[in-house]
Image (cartoon, rainbow, N blue to C red):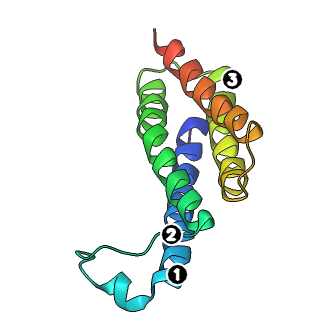
Amino acid sequence: MATELTMLAWAMLLGFVYIFAASTVVTRERGMKWNASARDDSSKPLSPLAGRLQRAQSNFFETFPFFAAAAIAVVLTGRGSDTTALAAQFYFWARVVYLPLYAAGVPYVRSLVWLVSIVAILAMVFALL
């Protein structure tokens, strides 16, 4: 299987890590009753950690569709190369590093890691042009 698709599969699993990280902390703060409810009432504010994990999750799901589309398109069009394979790996590993950096509230480095993931996606897109 193409490296780009392998990294896509790993990124899909990583998406679940983002979901579970955020939902676990929020549920711990708000309780199982809240988790099982329709969540129609206003809830107490989240802790900084829970808020950061939710924002990290949102950020992952903002970039993931672009990565998935680029990875699939590169493979389907036969435009895969060592560069696109490396870009897919950079995207995945940047997103792995991003979660704990965001959870810990680390500024600047977190933004740099995010930029690596965006450049990786763009490298794959440019291979299609």
Q: Residue at x 55, y 50 (%)?
A: 11
Q: Nearer the viewer, mark 3 or mark 2?
A: 2
31 vs 58, nearest the viewer: 31
Q: Which mark is residue 82?
A: 3
Q: Is residue 23 above or below residue 33?
A: above
Q: Are marks 3 and 2 in contact (CB under 8 Å)?
A: no
Residue at image mark 2: 46
Q: In the structure shown, which secondary structural element does the residue marked by tag 2 occupy?
A: loop
Residue 47 horizontal/vertical position (percent): 57, 69
Residue 44 picture quarter: bottom left
Tally of marks: 3
| On-image quarter of the N terminus | top right
Q: Is residue 26 above or below residue 74?
A: below
Q: Are marks 2 and 1 in contact (CB under 8 Å)?
A: yes
Q: Residue furthest bottom?
A: 33
- Amino acid at the residue labelled 2: Leu
